[in-house]
Every structure is written in structure tokens, then in C-alpha cells.
Amino acid sequence: MSFSHFNLSSAIQHKIKLKNFTKPTPIQEKVIPLVLDKKDVMAKAQTGSGKSASFILPLVQMIAHAQYEGKAKIRALVLTPTRELTQQVAEDFEYFAPNRVKVVSVIGGEQLGAQMLAIQKGCDIVVATSGRLLEIIRKGQINLTQVQYFVLDEADKMLGLGFEEELKALLKDMPSVRQNLLFSATYPKKVVELSAKITSNYIEVSIESEEATVQNIHQRVIEVHKDNRGPLLRYLIEKEAYEQVLVFMSGKRAADNIAMKFRKYGFKAEAFHGDLCQDERNFTLKTYKEKKIKVLFATDIAARGSSSVICSRISSELKS
Ligand code: AMP
């Protein structure tokens, strides 16, 4: 199947081509037509599956082609679990949407005033982390009464402390009739309960795991004793001449420690986790994208962003 199969405008198709997306991923094949058909969707999709574009492309299509009077009002609200994912999704919306469609990202750790101003000037799409969005709602500085599309990305990562309460407050502010799109890599009971609060009538979509990621991501498993992981990684970096590597870690301290160790071995290595302030997080990611860091040890706050980065061997596939 090709992207021309969907009813997307020629402007969007042109941008898809410029991105070198040659054909839709399996999740895109299933989700894009459903979204365009105004269905609620619950999709089991992982980072790397192309899930973001599966909602971004049809939403841009529908928002860009609707006729709206007067100042822009928020038509789409997208919630994501991390600041980095929010920024990335907002950038993708901006890339695919025409200039007149205004996109604002709302995240903690950056100036509240500037975000509120951007919202008040009028915008069509808000991409947000829930905590900061709620702060703005409580100040009465955002109007969600015109929201037609509500997206919850990586729902299973949102189940942390207090999210249910935040969601309740959000749902109160949005119209009850809207299109809902939920994405989650896993379906624990809590996600199912959460989805029931958002929509009662959704179509479930999932794909076989072997076709779960976009084609230019290669995955490989190496079994290794815990103590040998560092030496193995150093060996692989040298032997396979990896240009850049992103390593996911379970804890912040472990990320700090191993980055320090790699620096001792002469690598340009850094840690990336939630204890860094937002400026440091932005700076680290920017430096990584500029290829000034060779090995980045990250906890899952980075569990996307430059997603081709994610799974593995990063090299020329690294997307800016
Ligand atoms: P995601 O699963 O949304 O995090 O996307 C994973 C990566 O795949 C991102 O870098 C996307 O830009 C890229 N991508 C999305 N759709 C396609 C496609 N149809 N073909 C190739 N790459 C894609």
C-alpha cells in the first residue's frame, strides 16, 4: 500500500515524500483510514511503529481542510507522558501542517507565561504534558470547549501518580462529543479502565509484533552477563564503528555512573534523565543530535524524540 491510497492532500503527501517515508507502516495502514472516518481508536502501538504519524497525518488533514471562522480555537488536544515526546509530536504537527494551522506545545520546566500567551493568541493544536496543562486550566487560561480530537499517546506511561485525577479535570473541560484516539504499547487493566473513561465506542487496532517497527530500524538481541554489558558495548562501538549510540537505562544513578565510566574510557558520553533541568535536557538532546555526544545513557524520559535513535544502532538513520 502507498500513502496515495489515503485521502490525504497533495501538500501532505509531498511532505511525506520529503521525509522519505516510502510507504505506510502497518499501524499507519490501519489507523489513518479509521481516523479519517472519524472513528474512536485504541491502538496497541510501540515507539518505532510510526504511531505518531498515524494520528498526526489524518488530524492535520482534517484540521487544515475545515473552515473555521475568526481566531483559531483549540481543535485537537494531544497528551503525552514526557516533555521530549510532546516537543517531538508538536514539531511533527508543525512540519506537516500548513503555516496557518497553529501548534503550541505545553510542557513543564519552561516558562509558563510564554505558553499561556501562545495559547491566548489562538491555536488549533495543543500538544501537552498533563501537569502543565492542568496548571493552565486552573488559571482559567485555556478554552477546551471546541476540542474535536483528543489523543492520548503512550497511555500506559501516563498511569503514574495523579494522572487519573488530572484526566478527570480535563475531560470536564472538553465537549463530551469528540473523536478519541488512544495509543498504548501495553494494555494493563488500568489502561483499559482509563480508556473506558474516555470513550465507550472505540475500534481496537493492533499489529503483529514482527512487523511492529518501521523498516529502517533493525533490532538485535545479545545475551550477556550483567557485568559484561559495559565492556561489550565498548567492544561493539569500536568493532562495528557505531557513529552514535543511545542506551536506555532503568535508573538515573546508573545512567550517571556508566556515563562517567565511559568518559574515563575516552568516549564522549553523557547521561540524560529527569533530574536534569529542562534547559539541560534540551541542551543534551541538541548536542546529541549535533553528534557531539557519542553515547547517551538515558532513562525512559527519552523514550523517543528522535525515535529512529531509539532502538538500537544509530547512525545515519538519526533523524533531526
Ligand atoms: P514513532 O513510532 O511514531 O515514534 O515513529 C518512529 C520513527 O519512524 C520516527 O522517526 C518517524 O519519523 C519514522 N516514521 C514514521 N512513519 C514512517 C514511515 N511510513 N516510513 C518510514 N519512517 C517512518
Image: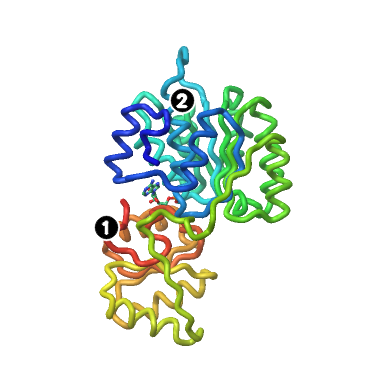
The residue that appears at 38% across and 54% down in the rendered structure is 306
Residue matched to label 1:
290
Amino acid at circle 1: Glu
The residue that appears at 46% across and 13% down in the rendered structure is 70
User: Label 1: how many residues lie within 10 Å, few (<14), some (14-19) or many (20+)?
Assistant: few
Q: How many marks?
A: 2
The residue that appears at 70% across and 48% down in the rendered structure is 192
Query: Cβ of disc 2 within 8 Å of ligand 1?
Result: no
The residue that appears at 36% across and 24% down in the rendered structure is 100
Residue matched to label 2:
63
**Nearest the camera: 18 or 259?**
18
Q: Which mark is residue 261?
A: none
Left or right: 301 with respect to 16? right
Amino acid at circle 2: Ile
Left or right: 165 with respect to 96? right
Give the CA distance from mark 2 to mark 1. Answer: 33 Å
Left or right: 197 with respect to 290? right
